[in-house]
Image (cartoon, helix red, strand yellow):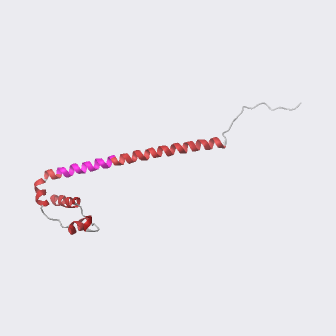
Amino acid sequence: MRYQALPTPFRRAFTLVELLTVVIIIAILATISLTVMNGAMQAAREAKTRATIQRIDTAILDIFESYEERYNDIAAIPLPDAQVQAAFGLASTTDVTEGHRVAIRLHMIRD
């Protein structure tokens, strides 16, 4: 009579294919979630930028309302392109915009 070992509980291990499948699924989910998070972060940045621009706009309007009479006097002063270019360190006089002139005039109001 042959000796027979007592049956042990069957213990099943994960196969390499199963482990790789799980890793691939996790990688796909991580990629999808990172894509969604990047979009949300971009939308948040844009909202913050819009809010900042709105605050700047409100501040400039407040300054104009507070110093309207003085600004009108200063606005009559001509600002040559070369002066504006030097003040902002622009590459050429063709880069000068009305926004640059307004910024200089606002600085003149404060002084």
Whether residue 8 is situated above or below residue 73 in the rendered picture: above
Left or right of 26 in this view: 73: left
Point 10% across, 55% down: residue: 69
Q: Which residues are magenta?
A: 47-62
Left or right of 53 in this view: 29: right
Task: Please identify the quadrant where the C terminus is shown.
Answer: bottom left
Judged from this view, the residue extending furthest toward the front is: 94
Residue 48 picture location, percent across and down: 32, 47
Point 67% across, 41% down: residue: 15
Q: Quadrant of residue 14?
A: top right
Question: Closest to the observer: 77 or 111?
Answer: 77
Residue 38 lies in magenta, yes or no? Answer: no
Residue 66 picture location, percent across and down: 14, 51
Task: Please identify the quadrant where the N terminus is shown.
Answer: top right
Left or right of 46 in this view: 94: left
Point 72% across, 33% down: residue: 10
